[in-house]
Image (tube, grey):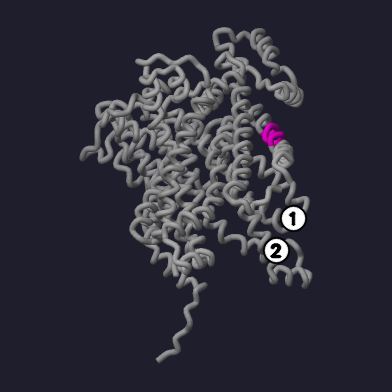
Amino acid sequence: MNLWQYLFRRILSTLPTVFGALVVMFILTRILPGDPALMVLGPAHSSPENIEQMRKVMGLDHSVPVQFFRYLGQLIQGDLGYSWHSGNPVVKELIMRFPATFELTSLSLLLMIFFGLPLGIIAGYYRNKAPDNIINGFTVLGISMPTFWLGLLLIYIFYFILDIAPPPMGRLSAEVTAPPVVTGLLLVDTLLNRDLSAFLSALHQLILPAVTLAFFNLAIIVRTLKADIIDILREDFIRTARAMGLSQKRILFKHALRNALLPTLTMLGTIYGSLLGGAILTEVVFSWPGVGMYAVESIQWLDYSGLQGFIIFYVLVFTMVNLLVDISYKVVDPRVQLD
Amino acid sequence: MKNQKPLDTESLRFKLHLFIRSKLAVVGLIFLLFVFGLVILGPSFSPYDPLAIDFAVKLNPPSKEHLLGTDNFGRDLMSRIFSGARYTLLAAFVSVLIGLFIGTPLGVLSGYLGKKTDLILMRIMDILLAFPPLLLAMAIVSGLGPSLVNASVAIGISYIPHFARMARSRAINVRSMEYVQAAVAVGAPRIRILLSHVLPNCLTPIIVQATVYTGYGILWVAGLSFIGLGAKLPTPEWGLMIAESRQYIISGEWWVTIFPGLFIMLGVTGFTLIGDGLREVLNPKLRVQ
């Protein structure tokens, strides 16, 4: 089967899941307590006539199934509705905010891979010896720390005590001017604008949230990779390689790592999913204006369309990432057949 | 001299020996005993009333009178943490029980029966899995209304597909075992085969998973409370305590946020280490040769 056929079939097979997710989410958001019409108007303008009219404008006067089909119709046209609490269409809001989340999760992912792979290999290679025990201690700590608490701890240490981190408020220090929006990614836009001080400020603001977010998943990556390396080092082909007198380094990096990467790669899809989830808490702690923060605000404001938009957006991103992961198997392991 | 029996690697005694030999598991056990002590006896260990407001000692650092300091209402932090253990921990337990008791039967049925049942059940599970756990919980809680009980129900629902998948993959293995086929051959009723042959043999990995997920449950409960979707003020739930005192971290009153977090870590570490220990004991492949 060629790649395009495979892609087409895979995308087709995710449609029922996405549709099911839509139904579940629609039901969930419709049982939210409180009247969104009242929320939009505010208590000062909440006469019964006003509320009645607002409900009509918001489409809440129809039955839930009718609302659902109207929503589907709009969705097919790429319209996720209007976000009442921010006064913008949801799509615009998500597009505006996603670069912030993307920057945060990407840097986190890079940190995880950069530190996770070597630590996992070392722990697997020196199993039950000192390096493994130390790394093991760190991973247990990493797994048991609440993300939001770690964020606050890092703020305390690096902002309050050492005073080397910026105040945990947003993506850019108040002293530098924001670059014109090209990609929305501040690290890219500041460079396009040739404004080095703004670039450094953006990077400075990004480091603590990215480290906070990376910590939990770093531990998961190290643990998976370690278990795989241990299994693979027992395999016959490793013994053969040893018998042939290949160097330890070559065996570890050329033979073992390549085979251990596959299960770790499988994890990456799930991990990116949990990164987006963890980003919600991290964004709240660091007042980071990303999509996670938007989801929390939407819930607080009973903003149906905002929450729905975020969920659909998330499910799509998650599906895409998993698809990319499956395709990248083939690069790592040519034996894998796409089917 | 007595005849020396060969070492029975499946005996309870041998397994206990393995568990104790793994020092980390014992550390985990000690952590858990401490935390369980707090769940049961927390309020009686508390030196002060966890809700008593006293502005005279507002935001006092740890001292002899208040070992862990006081919060912005002058409430004794140690009393609040000790009395609050039961909220966080019980909510985590409830969530795992929901996932376990709904997810496991669904997974076993799905794996054993296969065909259409499997297809439909697993599709539903896939849909649940397509949501990030925190987001699914957020959506459910905002539907049911924020409270600690609803938070644990929401987390429980997001656990269901995980338990179902684990049980299903075991059930598929067990289905083709000879003892199950023998039971089918002698005409045992299906319900009996499921309950007394398939289910018990699927439980081992599920017990490990339940232990580890209780630890994660503590994190989710605290996380939901942190964003205002869990326990309500002035409950001394650990995540909520951190949320309440969040702003004081940038003015240097560290103890109000740091201590509740340390206790969360203590609980989660306990469950994680025990889970690792159990995995090693129950799965012969992982044992150290």
Image mark 2: chain: B
Image point 54% across, 39% down: which residue? Answer: A272
User: Mostly what secondary structure, the magenta segment?
Assistant: helix
Task: Tell me which segment is drawn in magenta.
Answer: A18-24
Residue B255 position, x and y percent, is: 30, 35
Marks 1 and 2: CB-CB under 8 Å? yes
Amino acid of disc 1: Gly
Any mark on residue B114, and which?
A: 1
In terms of depth relative to the viewer, which is nearer, A228 or B143? A228
In terms of depth relative to the viewer, which is nearer, A296 or A271? A271
* Occupied quadrant, residue A170: top left
Residue A245 position, x and y percent, is: 44, 66
From the viewer's perspective, is B196 left or right of B138? Answer: right
Q: Which residue corresponds to mark 2?
A: B175
Mark 1 and mark 2: span between their CA atoms?
A: 10 Å
Mark 1 surroundings: few (<14), some (14-19) or many (≥20) residues within 10 A: some
Image point 67% across, 35% down: which residue? Answer: A21
Residue A76 position, x and y percent, is: 73, 24
Can residue A32 be seen by looking at this rendering?
yes
Image point 68% across, 20% down: which residue? Answer: A79
B54 in the magenta segment: no
B71 vs B178: above or below: above
